[in-house]
Image (tube, rainbow, N blue to C red):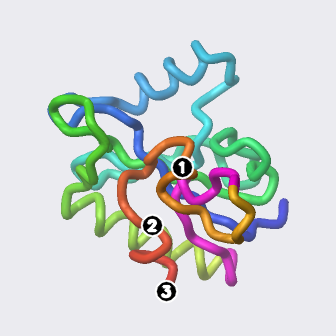
Amino acid sequence: MRKINLIVLHCSATRETMEYTPEQLERDHKARGFFSAGYNYYIRRSGELVPMRPPEQIPAHVRGYNAFSLGICYEGGLDAGGHPKDTRTERQKLSIRGLLLLLLVQYPGCRICGHRDLSPDRNGDGKITRDEWLKECPCFDAEEEYGIL
């Protein structure tokens, strides 16, 4: 088994008004050249947890961090107009929290963060700020919400 010390949260960047199935996620990632969906877990609006890549398999979700991380993606992340928004349902929030608690038992000491938190530190001050984000994913502050689990 590989060493895991990072858990990264993502959104699917799909509108809150549309359904985005695990099959669509898989198809879209394959169309981008991946052999399967890049995340280890996908969480539907209903709260359903869908395993994607097994944890022992290196995911493809954040360049430079894949070898020692797990990726969790929730369905949504955009408002009806296509703008970034925390669209997590209460069921998604419960599923994410439950999954994270389980993963922290299996991989103690992991840092939990959002995809945006791994953007380059362009000004070199040791902090990734909003003006440095490459994207807003997962459209909420994952470190603040889940970093104290």
N-term mark: 3 or 1: 1
Callout 2 touching callout 3 (CB < 8 Å): no
Q: Please identify the quarter of the rendering in which residue 128 is found.
A: bottom right
Which numbered marker is on residue 133? Answer: 1
Residue 12 position within the rendered picture, expressed as x and y whole percent measured from the top left: 41, 38
Residue type at mark 2 is: Ala
Q: Report which quarter residue 24 is drawn in.
A: top left
Check disc 1 and report its element: helix, strand or loop. loop
Numbered disc total:
3
Q: Do the residues labelled 3 and 1 touch (CB within 8 Å)?
A: no
112 within the magenta span: yes
Residue that numbered label 3 is attached to: 148
Q: Say which residue appears at 75% left-offset and 49% top-offset.
A: 66
Can you name the residue that lies furthest to the top here? 31
Disc 2 residue crowd, few under 14, some 14–19, many 20+, Cα 10 Å? some
- Residue drawn at x 43%, y 25% is 23
Q: In the rendered structure, which amino acid carries the disc numbered 1?
A: Trp
Q: Circle 1: is it few (<14), some (14-19), or many (20+) Cα within 10 Å?
A: some
Question: Tag 3: residue type?
Answer: Ile
Rendered-image quadrant of the N terminus: bottom right
7 in the magenta segment: no
x then y, percent, for residue 56? 75, 53
Tell me the magenta residue range.
Answer: 107-122
Residue at 44% in and 47% down:
136
Residue that numbered label 2 is attached to: 142
Helix, strand or loop status at disc 2: helix
